[in-house]
Image: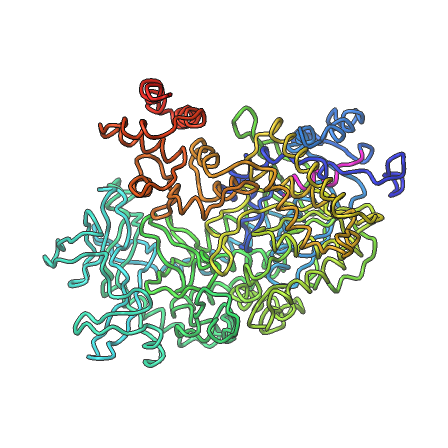
């Protein structure tokens, strides 16, 4: 069907399903599960790390609702049925019905095709900020021609391998791995052995535990920099205990409570494991008590030393002999054998000239993520890996790691087939996440944390050294990363889909359409794309201010990858990844918010040029406040777009890992839908305001009546509908003889939505009470579009964050203390204050008559007590109402 024939009968552009509705509830339901088990739902995305990856189910749904618009171009296959056509394909009217039935009230009809093998003809999709390639992978599964661009070579390489995975011979890939395994696995694992504490034989090392050391600046005593002396939680004998290091005899012993005083079972030394020698950027001498800044001492002492103090082991011999788990796996003190083995590996590394070619030779570039103190306008966070004594990339590894990694990379380089070599390199690069002296051990969960757990380079005081090749247990080893890469390749060739039916997660049979058949990716800047009117859709996740400086962080992988790729690809011939060209606010490049906004406008201008007149732009966006809404709307409208819809994403990413670099939380993740603008008509603000108000009210009413959405979610959808009303008149809205800017209109829209709401703190509190496992994120969403604010609710002690998010219920000390102070000072009380105060006194057998006698017993208070009883299941509220309040109702 031609572009012209896709117009409606009256010549206007047809609306796409994604403009009319989006299955927020269904997406969030499956996204929540996918987010916790990415490697099983869509293993292709766990082949290699990329920051802020969107979940596949989110982009699959965006693609489905953006691309399916013409039943004549749609074929539907039943998964697992030998590519047999589904009934949907022969019944075009049925597909048309699914498309037409999508609306704000009920967007689910097209969701029927979510678990189907859907093919759409003649669609071309671009992602100009492809990052980890999620949008491209998902669009390719619909048989669209997909084109991706990214300035970053690491992103380009990762996306390239994902999209090529569907064509790779798995048997050849496995053979290449076995070649490398035969070549180096024994050599590597031989240097990760330890003496088993339960017999005259060796066990495998899972992790080696190290601690940094500095000399005391006062007395010269060597001080190990322990924040605390925990090693790991006791796994088997006593789940409540902890393995800790005795600071006196250096034995590894088990104690009941690491926060309390205990006695070493080996030397009778008494100590509190919680109290180490380092914290808050300083260390204390155990001999003279001198305190001194760690960074200053590192600078003055020309670096730091490290000490090997403990080992986590696994003994296959004891396991095979049927011994208890506590014997074949556990923790032990580092002994002379362990230190001698390290020295042997170190000697091999230092005496090998060939292996040095297989480690990075570059210095760590000065940047905002490596030494933020060097730049004006720091983004915060105290990033200072260089000041911690790391000048070259190899400083992040000890000598045994450099020997092992270079030995492994050299073996990979000897694989003749370039495709096989690159997938082995992908596994190697992913294994770097867990194989440096920049990773730490999580003692509460008995596992290693990857280097980018905080999206930064955080030099640890107690680094751990992983077993590079790997053993039975442990995470992040090369062999286990290889398993993940292999699973990703297998999934690319035989993808499936998971969905929820009757509350249960179901998995489809294998789709016959492999991933990435008609795809191409380019390492280039969006502003350098030359096509015009080429794409039916641009689906992407654009950069957001200074959230993550990918260019600096990705150098960690780049310097290793380019060792094997620089002769193959020009983009790997530079010393580091492009930084100045990156569209991001980065003080290291003298780029702030204004520069970011200007560059994003350039990007939107280019996107508009490459998009067809009836094309669609759909992208995810990290929303924080009305100002960023205004900037976004301005950038889109100024470059020829009109916003047609917006939808919240509540379960897309782990919010604990997503904060802006100034520490403030991102409130919403949303989908923005925009189309090339049609003729814009002038309008007065008063007329537009009435349209906006009606749109907001109608949208809210429809969603409240027909959808199971929070008020915050409804507010996001309202905002998108209101933006659409404005977008049709951008640059032509007159108020008092002056043209209003998009930012001014956004502020007014906020006012319209706020004014139309009578929702306050008590309503939000009741909603939170009814929310299972209520969180601060729920609070943020529920207060959007209401008269309540998180700040005001915090002031009222309606929640606290001292030890995780907790609601201020009647049995919360801080909440009751707040109410008590207001009662004693005769300050005005809310109905919630009164109800909780009465409930508290009732529980403690105190009289309530005095207060009921002087308080007005209103219908609102009665209704609130009923609401509290319903929300909490606590009928005491209702009993108070029935047996006490009526006695004082005059």
Residue most toward the front?
890
Residues in magenta, as a range: 59-70
Q: Is residue 259 left or right of residue 132?
A: left
Q: Quadrant of the C terminus?
A: top left
Indicate the quadrant where residue 309 lies. Answer: bottom left
Pinpoint residue 627: horizontal percent, then vertical percent.
61, 55
Q: Is residue 91 left or right of residue 633?
A: right
Q: Residue at (45%, 46%) from the top-left corner? A: 792
**698 and 300: which one is in front?**
698
Pinpoint residue 534: horizontal percent, then vertical percent.
82, 52
Q: Is residue 145 visible?
A: no
Indicate the quadrant where residue 710 lies. Answer: top right
Measured along the vertical axis of the image, is residue 70 above or below residue 408? above
Q: Is residue 385 visible?
A: yes
Pinpoint residue 652: horizontal percent, then vertical percent.
55, 44
**586 and 65: which one is in front?**
586
Pinpoint residue 861: horizontal percent, then vertical percent.
41, 27
**785 and 590: which one is in front?**
785
Check residue 157 for magenta coloring. no
Q: Quadrant of the N terminus?
A: top right
Q: Is residue 287 left or right of residue 30?
A: left
Q: What secondary structure is the magenta-colored segment mainly?
A: helix
């Amino acid at each position: 069907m031609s572009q012209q024939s896709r117009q409606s009968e009256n010549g206007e552009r047809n609306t796409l399903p994604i403009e009319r509705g989006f299955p927020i509830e269904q997406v969030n339901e499956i996204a929540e599960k996918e987010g916790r088990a990415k490697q099983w739902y869509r293993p292709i995305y766990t082949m290699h790390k990329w920051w802020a990856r969107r979940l596949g189910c989110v982009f699959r749904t965006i693609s489905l609702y953006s691309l399916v618009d013409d039943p004549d171009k749609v074929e539907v296959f039943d998964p697992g049925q030998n590519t047999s056509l589904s009934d949907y394909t022969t019944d075009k009217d049925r597909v048309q019905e699914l498309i037409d039935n999508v609306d704000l009230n009920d967007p689910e009809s097209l969701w029927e095709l979510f678990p189907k093998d859907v093919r759409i003809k003649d669609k071309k999709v671009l992602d100009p900020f492809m990052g980890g390639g999620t949008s491209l992978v998902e669009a390719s599964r619909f048989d669209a021609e997909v084109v991706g661009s990214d300035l970053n070579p690491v992103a380009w390489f990762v996306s390239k391998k994902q999209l090529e995975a569907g064509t790779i011979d798995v048997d050849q890939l496995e053979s290449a791995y076995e070649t490398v395994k035969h070549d180096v696995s024994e050599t590597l694992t031989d240097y990760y052995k330890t003496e088993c504490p339960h017999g005259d034989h060796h066990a495998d090392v899972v992790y080696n535990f190290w601690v940094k050391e500095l000399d005391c600046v006062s007395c010269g005593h060597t001080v190990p920099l322990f924040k605390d002396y925990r090693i790991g939680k006791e796994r088997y004998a006593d789940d409540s205990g902890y393995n800790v290091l005795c600071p006196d005899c250096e034995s590894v012993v088990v104690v009941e409570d690491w926060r309390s005083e205990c006695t070493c079972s080996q030397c009778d030394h008494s100590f509190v494991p919680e109290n180490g020698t380092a914290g808050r950027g300083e260390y204390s001498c155990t001999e003279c008590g001198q305190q001194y800044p760690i960074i200053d001492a590192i600078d003055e002492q020309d670096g730091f030393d490290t000490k090997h103090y403990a080992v986590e082991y696994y003994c296959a011999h004891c396991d095979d002999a049927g011994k208890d788990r506590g014997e074949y796996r556990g923790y032990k003190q580092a002994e002379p054998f362990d230190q001698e083995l390290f020295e042997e590996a170190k000697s091999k590394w230092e005496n090998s000239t060939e292996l040095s070619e297989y480690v990075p030779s570059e210095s760590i570039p000065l940047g905002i993520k490596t030494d933020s103190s060097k730049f004006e306008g720091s983004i915060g966070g105290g990033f200072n890996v260089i000041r911690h004594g790391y000048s070259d990339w190899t400083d992040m590894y000890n000598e045994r790691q450099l020997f092992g990694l270079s030995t492994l990379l050299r073996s990979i380089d000897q694989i003749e087939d370039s495709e096989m070599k690159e997938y082995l390199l992908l596994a190697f690069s992913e294994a770097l996440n867990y194989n440096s002296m920049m990773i730490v051990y999580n003692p509460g969960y008995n596992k290693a944390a990857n280097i980018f757990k905080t999206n930064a380079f955080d030099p640890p005081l107690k680094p751990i050294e992983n077993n590079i090749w790997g053993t039975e247990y442990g995470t992040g080893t090369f062999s286990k990363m290889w398993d993940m890469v292999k699973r990703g390749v297998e999934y690319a060739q035989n993808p499936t889909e998971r969905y929820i039916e009757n509350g249960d997660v179901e998995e489809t049979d294998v789709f016959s359409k492999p991933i990435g058949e008609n795809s191409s990716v380019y390492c280039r800047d969006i502003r350098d794309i030359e096509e015009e009117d080429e794409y039916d859709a641009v689906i992407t996740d654009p950069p957001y201010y200074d959230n993550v400086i990918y260019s600096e962080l990705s150098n960690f992988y780049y310097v290793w990858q380019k060792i094997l790729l620089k002769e193959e690809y020009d983009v790997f011939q530079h010393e580091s990844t492009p930084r100045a060209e990156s569209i991001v606010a980065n003080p290291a490049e003298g780029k702030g918010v204004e520069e970011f906004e200007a560059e994003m406008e350039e990007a939107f201008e280019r996107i508009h040029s490459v998009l067809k007149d009836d094309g669609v732009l759909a992208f995810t966006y990290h929303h924080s406040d009305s100002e960023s809404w205004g900037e976004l709307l301005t950038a889109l409208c100024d470059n020829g777009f009109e916003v047609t819809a917006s939808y919240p994403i509540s379960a897309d990413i782990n919010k604990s890992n997503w904060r802006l670099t100034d520490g403030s939380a991102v409130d919403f993740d949303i989908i923005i839908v925009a189309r090339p603008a049609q003729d814009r008509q002038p309008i007065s603000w008063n007329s537009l305001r009435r349209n906006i108000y009606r749109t907001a009210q109608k949208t809210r009413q429809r969603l409240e009546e027909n959808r199971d959405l929070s008020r915050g979610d409804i507010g996001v959808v309202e905002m998108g509908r209101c933006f659409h009303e404005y977008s049709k008149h951008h640059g032509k809205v007159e108020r008092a003889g002056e043209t209003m800017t998009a930012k001014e209109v956004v502020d007014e829209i906020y006012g319209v939505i706020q004014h139309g709401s009578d929702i306050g703190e008590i309503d939000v509190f009741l909603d939170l009470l009814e929310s299972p496992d209520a969180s601060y994120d729920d609070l943020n969403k529920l207060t959007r579009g209401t008269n309540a604010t998180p700040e005001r609710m915090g002031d009222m002690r309606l929640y606290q964050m001292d030890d995780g998010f907790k609601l201020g219920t009647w049995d919360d000390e801080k909440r009751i203390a707040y109410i008590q102070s207001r009662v004693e000072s005769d300050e005005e009380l809310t109905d919630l204050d009164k109800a909780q105060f009465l409930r508290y006194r009732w529980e403690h057998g105190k009289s309530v008559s005095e207060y009921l006698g002087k308080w007005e017993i209103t219908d609102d208070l009665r209704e609130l007590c009923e609401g509290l009883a319903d929300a909490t299941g606590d009928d005491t509220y209702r009993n108070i109402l029935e047996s006490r309040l009526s006695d004082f109702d005059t």
